[in-house]
Image (spheres, rainbow, N blue to C red):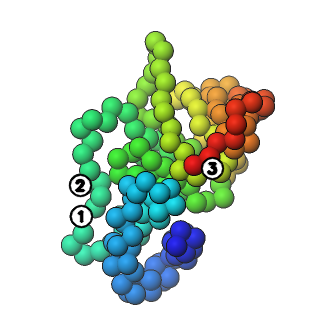
Amino acid sequence: MLFALIALEKFSQTSENKLTVSESSISDRLAVLESWADHPDHLKRQVGFCSQWSLDNLFLKEGRQFTYEKVSLTNINAMLNSNDVSEYLKISPTGLEARCDASSFESVRCTFCVDSGVWYYEVTVITSGVMQIGWATKDSKFLNHEGYGIGDDEYSCAYDGCRQLIWYNARSKPHSHPCWKE
């Protein structure tokens, strides 16, 4: 199902194809799968995320309220910044989840600036693939088509738990943590 949803999204990148798919009542089927967006099973959660994202961005369902209009951001102090993100990254309405189904290297910064003290954040990895998670200043450049993102300049550092590498200034060093899993 996940691969079918991703293929459907890619197929719908042209307006003619999107219209054809929209007329097939796909939004009714996606609405059923959307309920999996918070499922504890990681694969179902990915299907739910993609279904919800498609309903909010591609296949609008008449009478359905956008997810970002329904979520409460009351207890969220920092989130992924939808205004400081590269082209193909999908961000959840809460700003706490991201997904990339493109072959390019996508990046996003947080909405909260850290400039003193000791800070940390936690990440729940839903897929075990290649990704670099770390820290970046506002001067760090994200150029997704050139494969340039977090850890690729002197203004950022990153950890890739799939390849077990620490990145800084476009150079990597091996790290001995076990390979991450979803």
Circle 1 — which element? loop
Q: Are marks 2 and 1 in contact (CB under 8 Å)?
A: yes
The mark found on residue 128 in the picture is 3
Q: Residues within 10 Å of mark 3 (few under 14, many from 20)?
A: few
**In this rendering, would 156 be left or right of 67?**
right
Residue positioned 39% across, 70% down in the render = 33
Residue positioned 38% across, 33% down in the render = 78
Residue positioned 34% across, 73% down in the render = 32
Residue 25, image x, y percentages? 36, 84
Which residue type carries mark 3? Answer: Ser
Residue 95, image x, y percentages? 39, 45
Question: Separation of disc 1 and disc 3 at Cα?
Answer: 32 Å
Which residue type carries mark 1? Answer: Gln
Pair 1/3: label in front:
3
Asked if one can make out residue 13 in the rendered structure from this viewpoint, the answer is no
Res 24 quadrant in image? bottom left
Which residue type carries mark 2? Answer: Lys
Q: Residues within 10 Å of mark 2 (few under 14, many from 20)?
A: few
The mark found on residue 65 in the picture is 1
Res 88 quadrant in image? bottom right
Residue 50, image x, y percentages? 46, 63
Mark 2 or 1 closer to N-term?
A: 1
Name the residue tied to disc 2: 70
